[in-house]
Image (cartoon, rainbow, N blue to C red):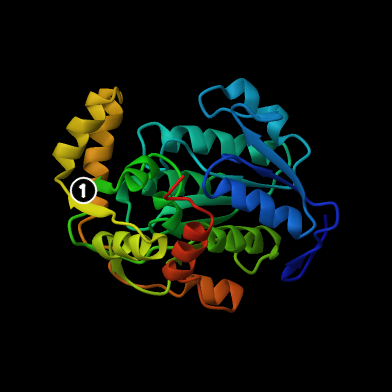
Amino acid sequence: MTNTGNTTDMAGMTVLVTGASGRVGRRVVETAGAAGLTVRAASRSGAVRFDWADRSTWADALRGADAAHLAYLPDVGAPGAAEAVGAFARQAVALGVRRLTLLSARGEEQAHATERAVRESGAEWTVVRASWFAQNLSEGPLLDGMRGGELVFPAGEVLEPFIDTRDIADVVVAALTGGDRFAGRTLGLTGPRLLSFRQAVAEVAAAAGREITYVPVSAREYGAALAGFGVPAGEVEFLVELFETNLDGRNAKLSEGVREVLGREPRDFADFAHECAGAGTWTS
């Protein structure tokens, strides 16, 4: 890999993608591969084994990589995230991995310590702060409720600039391959318009041609339901705090990150809804 001013020669560039089976990681793998990078897709059960909780898996995943995308599970602001991500970033630098991107969350104060750990690691870093994923309604734990015709969630009527995870992936790959253009920067990414969760669910329902209802509840009520499903108490408390703060309206504004990095508008939520509806996502 050679750095020529503001761009990176992608020929032979190897990128480690953590969380490669996740809503963002999977798209980073696809986008990086399409861009001609050699992709090392890492997850707890993948061909490249990687587990944030098992440090013995880190070195083999990192060794020989030029760059890495970091996505901490269960959340970038969760207890222990800053310590683990910081240790991983320092090990990456020690093994010759110079460029790191960190997937972070817009408006999440709990994530700031993790971001700081990456900034202080000695790597060339870019923090990608994303708004709420559109794909949270089509993949993952909220999908069953959407398919069942009712989304129960503690977002009230707050407005959120839902972002398509494909846009996040495009920005991540641009940052990894962009030389010094995005190094040392924190990029705020949002979709092109604000929607309440009620409006987002209504757009999904219209696209899918079926009735889906949004039922707002308090964060504490939602936490009690999670506990009833067996989610550990510590994780429940973290999620309750996260929902109480991050869904308080602080993110009800747009940012220019996608346009600045990619030179185009972010994908609209309506396009996402129609694509997923056409694929039968909410009727399967």
Vertical relation: 150 (above or below) 141: below
Q: Position of residue 175 (x, y in %)?
A: 62, 62
- How many labels, in total? 1
**Residue that label 1 marks:** 154
Q: Where is residue 247 in the image (x, y as percent from the top left)?
A: 24, 54
Residue placed at 74% from the left, 53% from the top? 33
Residue at 42%, 43% (x, y): give it: 76
Q: In which quarter of the image is residue 260?
A: bottom right
Q: Residue furthest front?
A: 209
Q: Is residue 261 left or right of residue 138?
A: right
Residue 107 rendering spot, x and y as whole percentages:
32, 57
Q: Does residue 165 show up?
A: yes
Element at label 1 = loop
Percent coordinates x, y for residue 227 in the rendering: 23, 26
Q: Which amino acid type corresponds to the residue marked 1 in the rendered image?
A: Pro
Q: Nearer the viewer, residue 276 or 117?
A: 276
Name the residue at 62% across, 20% down.
56
Q: In which quarter of the image is the N terminus?
A: bottom right
